[in-house]
Amino acid sequence: MSETLAQQWHTVFHFDDLWEGEMESVEVDGKSVLLINLDGEVLAYRNRCPHQDWPLNDGDLEDNKLTCAQHLWEFDVTTGKGINPSTCALLTYQCKVDGDGNISVCVG
């Protein structure tokens, strides 16, 4: 991996601090990122609803459905695709957990 690509990954959180079924907002390189632990898999999305830029961490996560608190738009967090309406999608970021449990996100 080139040094440029390696610099795009940012360690942001520890896996043990993100319980299953929970979400957490973190700042990564000046961007608000929403981390979600879904059945032991960590997912990362831009922490803004594509509708009116409302912070998604203010919403509700139930099973694999994230509902924005502002206008109740719904998203499938397994894919980032919109449920209601189906014509929208969340911006997805690459995310990984290393052997020490550190969560890293690539926003570049």
Image (cartoon, grey):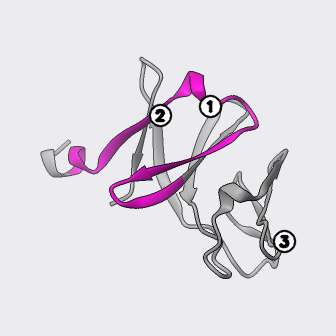
Give the Cα distance between marks 3 and 2: 28 Å
Q: Which mark is residue 71?
A: none
Cβ atoms at labels 3 and 2 below 8 Å apart: no
Expressed as whole percent of the image width and height from the top left, the position of residue 17 reads 58, 26
The image quarter containing residue 52 is bottom right
Amino acid type at mark 2: Phe
Cβ atoms at labels 2 and 1 below 8 Å apart: yes
Q: Is the C terminus in the top left, top right, bottom left or bottom right quadrant? A: bottom left
Residue for point 76% across, 66% down: 68
Q: Secondary structure at mark 2?
A: strand
Q: Nearer the viewer, residue 32 or 90?
A: 32
Q: Which residue is mark 1?
A: 18
Residue for point 55% across, 67% down: 91
Give the Cα distance between marks 3 and 1: 24 Å
Residue for point 42% across, 61% down: 31
Q: Is residue 4 left or right of residue 106?
A: left
Range of magenta residues: 5-33
Choose the circle earlier in sequence order: 3 or 2: 2
